[in-house]
Amino acid sequence: MLKNKIMSHKATVAVVGLGYVGLPLAVAFAQKGYKVKGIDVAQRRVDQLNQKKSYITDVPSSAVAAVVKKGNLEASTDFALLKTADAIILCVPTPIKKRYTPDVSYMTSACQSVAKYMRKETLVVLESTTYPGTTEELIQPILERGGLKAGKDFYLAFSPERIDPGNKTFDVTRIPKVVGGLTPKCTELTAALYGQIIKTIHSVSSTRAAEMTKLLENTFRIINIGWINEAAMMCHKLGIDIWEVVDAAKTKPFGFMPFYPGLGVGGHCIPEDPLYLYWKAKKYGFSSKFIRLSADLNHNMTAYAVERVKELLKDKGKSLAKANILVVGVTYKKDVRDLRKSPPLRLLELLKAQSSVDYYDPFVPYLNITGISMDSVLLTPALIKKYDCVIIAVDHTDVDYALIARHAKFIFDVKNVYKGKKLKNIETL
Ligand SMILES: NC(=O)c1ccc[n+]([C@@H]2O[C@H](COP(=O)([O-])OP(=O)(O)OC[C@H]3O[C@@H](n4cnc5c(N)ncnc54)[C@H](O)[C@@H]3O)[C@@H](O)[C@H]2O)c1
């Protein structure tokens, strides 16, 4: 019966947690004609959606407006909306507490609320990135507290979100979806549901395999980014241009995938997800050396960048303490507004403690977060000339790099935006 409702688009789909992951998903289901109930604890987000406005760069307000106007998307902070839901998808945060420990409080709190209103024959899918075993060990017991049995009275599955904010080619509907249910029926229903908005569905044998898939992907990234950052530091000592070497290596049509150096890893995923795996493996007496090493390597890149700037300024007869520095780009990656765990923010903090520093970022007009309260400057020739060093920390598309190159005394180009052009006064990481 549930499958028929899903296939005929008559099922009501609820999305709990309307952030970078939940909102695109909610809009995608609503665009396919499903009645979607969006639940979030943040009143401001709910109000914005009901006023037909988006707060996520990748989801245009016009898309939100169209589905809200049609009556296909309704947002609320009230979990009672779940009473009518046939499928409930959980997209809440999974941050890290201090000392490499997962903070599962968002998942437990959301599940407790879901358990209050969930009916028989409902499909519940967890999308939040988390350690292998979460769905069965943490989510299932909470959902069963009301007396319903998972796999029998309701269906339970894990399906990792693999969205890449800012990626114009692969939106949520174009990324193959991995699904793993508690039982084959749970997997079948989950595959049927996502199959309505996503072309390629890949089913795995268990919720654990699906949970581990996402962690394998993100850990692969943190390790490779750690390695390329180490290689960049090594190449600098050897007097070799790492960017030239990566460009050469990537001409190999197999067995190599390019990663690029930078200030480390940021956002809600790469710095944290591997630590969920690290924590879980520790419980089984297994200590992952790769995860620990790459997390440390990436974390230290901001301090390394400051040391490089210090040396480069010294060569020009200027001490860091007396220097005026401009950091261009403060988000964790290009073309997004997301500041979570952003390495350029660590860079700003380190520089602020030792010199005079401003920032420019077209996505972030002001900063008011722990330890930093600043406004973005406006780039003018006169202002650029004032700085002893301009650090290109993020390669946003909409920055006038030519203007910077024309007027800057000196540029430390962390992202190689000038692509090795032989411009004087430019050094790369
Ligand atoms: N951002 C990404 O690129 C990305 C990609 C893939 C997977 N993920 C994973 O998806 C999950 C969500 O990440 P995100 O980036 O969308 O986070 P987010 O912070 O952008 O959104 C989470 C939303 O959940 C809401 N929320 C918190 N507690 C809640 C509760 N108890 N009930 C209802 N709503 C609640 C918050 O108010 C927020 O709007 C995380 O596990 C993350 O690791 C994120």
Image (cartoon, rainbow, N blue to C red):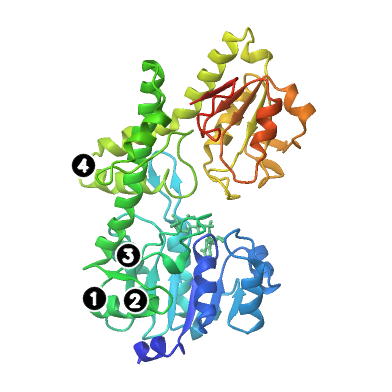
Location of mark 3 (residue): 135
Disc 3 marks a residue whose amino acid type is: Thr
Report, in whole angstroms, how far the alpha carbon at label 1 lies from the one at label 2.
11 Å
Q: Amino acid at mark 1?
A: Thr
Amino acid type at mark 4: Phe
Q: Residues within 10 Å of mark 3 (few under 14, many from 20)?
A: many
Q: Which mark sits nearer the N-terminus, 3 or 2?
A: 3
Kindly check if marks 4 and 3 are in contact, taking CB atoms under 8 A apart as contact. no
Report, in whole angstroms, how far the alpha carbon at label 1 lies from the one at label 4: 28 Å
Element carrying mark 2: helix
Q: Which residue is label 2 attached to?
A: 190
Q: Is residue 364 visible?
A: yes
Say whether mark 2 is within 8 Å of ligand 1. no
| Residue 286 numbered tag | 4
Task: State the residue position of label 1.
Answer: 183
Q: Is residue 65 left or right of residue 296?
A: right
